[in-house]
Image (cartoon, rainbow, N blue to C red):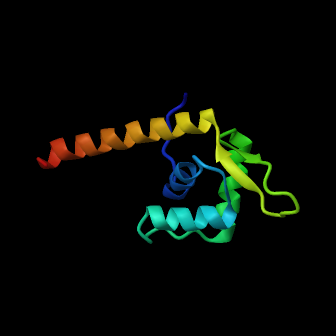
Amino acid sequence: MESFALTEAVFYVLLSLHTPLHGYGIMQKVESMSNGRVRLAAGTLYGAISSMVEKGWIVAVPGEKNSRKKEYVITENGKSVVSCELMRLKELVTNGESIIGG
């Protein structure tokens, strides 16, 4: 798998989708997970969702009958992306601590 850095918004969205959620649920979960620091605008969220669906990191799942809300869940490919990002972040922390003596 190629190595690249995820945006903070994409990383949090992927983390939030270990259980199926619709857009507003994702927004709430990301805000909660980041202690209110990350607040996703609808345009940012739906642009990210579209991109992640295209890349195969998340998929839409059937929601409740008669509901217009589409729910999404992370795929195995998406879980691999999160795992790679966690390794990259750990490397940053380790290297940063060794440089500043933390």
Residue 70 screen position, x and y as percent: 77, 57
Q: Residue furthest front?
A: 65
Query: Residue at point 16% right, 41% down?
Result: 98
Q: Residue furthest right?
A: 66
Q: Is residue 40 above or below residue 54?
A: below
Q: In this view, does 33 lie to the left or right of 55?
A: left
Query: Residue at point 51% right, 48% down?
Result: 6
Q: In this view, does 70 lie to the left or right of 85?
A: right
Q: In this view, does 37 lie above or below 87?
A: below
Q: Which residue lies furthest to the left in this view?
A: 101
Query: Residue at point 50% right, 41% down?
Result: 82
Is residue 13 or residue 93 the one in the foreground? 13
Q: In this view, does 18 lie above or below 71?
A: above
The number of numbered discs placed on residues in the rendered structure image is 0
Residue 26 screen position, x and y as percent: 61, 61
The quadrant of the image that shows the N terminus is top right
Query: Residue at point 14% right, 49% down?
Result: 100
Q: In this view, does 85 lie to the left or right of 40?
A: left
Q: In this view, does 22 lie to the left or right of 101?
A: right
- What is the quadrant of residue 80 in the picture? top right
Residue 32 screen position, x and y as percent: 47, 66
Residue 25 screen position, x and y as percent: 63, 64
